Amino acid sequence: MEALIPVINKLQDVFNMVGADIIHLPQIVVVGTQSSGKSSVLESLVGRDVLPRGTGIVTRRPLILQLVHIDPEDRRKSSEENGVDGEEWGKFLHTKNKIYTNFQEIRQEIEAETERISGTNKGISDEPIHLKVFSPHVVNLTLVDLPGITKVPVGDQPKDIEVLIRELIVKYISNPNSIILAVTAANTDMATSEALKVAREVDPDGRRTLAVVTKLDLMDAGTDAMDILMGRVIPVKLGIIGVVNSCVLMTFHRSQLDINQKKSVADAIRDEYAFLQKKYPSLANRSGTKYLARTLNRLLMHHIRDCLPELKTRINVLAAQYQSLLNSYGEPVEDKSATLLQLITKFAAEYCKTIEGTAKNIETAELCGGARICYIFHETFGRTLESVDPLGGLTTIDVLTAIRNATGPRPALFVPEVSFELLVKRQVKRLEEPSLRCVELVHEEMQRIIQHCSIYSTQELLRFPKLHDAIVEVVTSLLRKRLPVTNEMVHNLVAIELAYINTKHPDFADACGLMNHNIEEQRRNRMRDLPSAVPRDKAAAGGAQGSSSSEQTEGGTGNWRGMLKRGEDGAGDRVVPQTPLLSSPQKGHAVNLLDVPVPVSRKLSAREQRDCEVIERLIKSYFLIVRKNIQDSVPKAVMHFLVNHVKDCLQSELVGQLYKAVLLDDLLTESEDMAQRRNEAAEMLQALQKASQVIAEIRETHLW
């Protein structure tokens, strides 16, 4: 069990080498207010004066202190390897392999390193100092000394110094693998202890908190700390240990006068034992510095044992993550030609798979690639076409004007076919704009696929920014070249519909027949409703005489002209602007026939209303046929001329433009920070693998 702490020290060394703070290792965090005796407690555990002393805030950076117990045999071996002349020595992480045998120099180095980062005027920093002390007189422990809790800023300290220090303390004690050593002075009110208060914020059950009461020898005459040490004031699950002149549990703490007079720690511990035997004889065996060291060692060992399973799992998970990260950075390029061809081929394949919907990295937040193209075809484009009104922008006066213009100087007996073609072409032309917009949307989506493949599918490209930019440029250029070709085809699709108005289209003929049937039905209904004063045979005969010859000439009900002669004469009234007759000229005044009088409204005649209704119905029927054709043919044209062409030609286009010997070195130049990130990931992976080996050794030696 004792060997567990050196194992954790090894893990700490492993992660210190790579500057990693991703694993929370078991350690003891010392918390207390300023001048509560934290540093004295630590020095008593070390057995040497190693920490800076003075008034006010002295500890201004976290100090991670590893105590390593060495046996005489190990000491001789280490002395020979490191060239150390002495039984005790220390090492700092920031000074690499430098050995300190003079503990006065260790204290001076701590002060110098603190001032280097935190300044010389009481400033603080959260960057830790790592110190390892080797000695035959210590037990294996890992402790963290933090700045003391303070209320009032001094020197260069910011106004929110209390908040900053509290946040720093909470950062360390929030580690679930840490033990909290809450230090409180005996000559203060235990119920108002800031150390215990902040400890309870992160450890409300007290399972990780050990209390130390310091400065037992500085209490007022006639008073003692018996109730505090027995847990009658504030109970603490892990216990309360008292020391002389210390602030956590019961530990011996030297006064500043003793320190100034160079009183040794060993002498102070002897005096502490004598004091405890005299003042607290019943608690002497459960108080003092030595008992505190043994208790901390025991608690830390048991805590390490409990934390190791979770620690092992965490290390394995991180190792897998860093292995994946390292793989994404790729190996250093050896065969540039093969690497370039491989990257080009992979990008082209991923681009095509994204369109086809078979890519590995499929978006879940939004439509992408082929799915979005499908949405554009059937939702965006389809709904836009359906929203186009067949008669939109076409007024009754437009229809009448077209009919009149198509008849020339002669009054028309029937609606001329030219007027229908003129008006229906005008409406069909309105389908061209949404069709071209559909091409534009698909083109934009294929541009977006480039970035999708770069970010999610082929992370290797991030290693080579110039290659990435070159690929983007080639694909963009290919898309740009296909855009006018596709637009031209879509334009031609609409032009084809405008080139020939097929009034013999089966769907159009059926619609005309249905309308003729409706008009005939209306005529019969009107004949049935005629007054009795009008003989039905005469009305029918009159209608027959006016229509029989023309019906034979124009054909059956399937012809759209036939419906014009069977419309009812009195169907509804419409109001249209009318050009009034010019007033009779006064005598002696000439009349200008080119004057355009202001139109006034008038009701449509029965024939005009009939002609307008028939033309509008025909336009709507034929427009719906063309819209259906356009809605079907435009997506097919876009797929053939743009999407499928780019898919089929992308690989060859990339190879032809980029796979050239003169471009190899330039295209495969890594980004500046890629090599650094690869090295960092490799170092971290190596550290995690070493940590995993260390934990495996624990299992083999049955320590776990």
Image (cartoon, grey):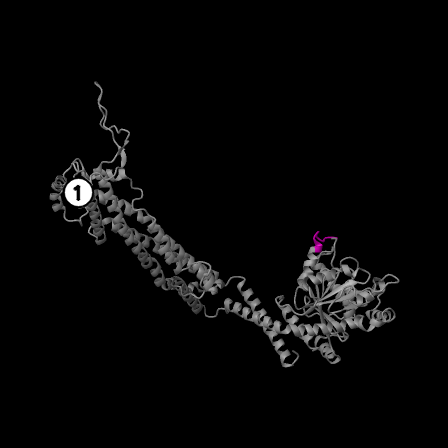
Q: Main secondary structure of the magenta part?
A: loop
Q: Is residue 701 left or right of residue 334?
A: right
The image shows residue 642, relative to residue 89, as above or below, that is: above
| Residue furthest to the front | 532
For image coordinates 65% across by 67% down, the residue present is 176
- Nearer to me, 456 or 348: 456
The image shows residue 541, relative to residue 651, as above or below, that is: above
Residue 626 spot, x, y in % from top left:
27, 51
The image shows residue 102, relative to residue 510, as above or below, that is: below
In terms of image quadrants, where is residue 589? top left
Residue 477 spot, x, y in % from top left:
38, 56
- Bounds of the magenta span? 154-162
Q: Is residue 298 left or right of residue 504?
A: right
Report if residue 198 is visible in the image. yes
Q: Report the residue marked by disc 1.
A: 565
Q: Quadrant of the C terminus?
A: bottom right
Q: Is residue 634 left or right of residue 346?
A: left
Residue 430 located within the stretch drawn in magenta: no
Secondary structure state at the residue bearing disc 1: helix
For image coordinates 21% across by 49% down, the residue present is 512
- Nearer to me, 297 or 145: 297
For image coordinates 25% across by 51% down, the residue present is 496
Residue 508 spot, x, y in % from top left:
22, 51
In terms of image quadrants, where is residue 142? bottom right
Amino acid marked by disc 1: Lys
Residue 156 located within the stretch drawn in magenta: yes
Residue 695 spot, x, y in % from top left:
62, 76
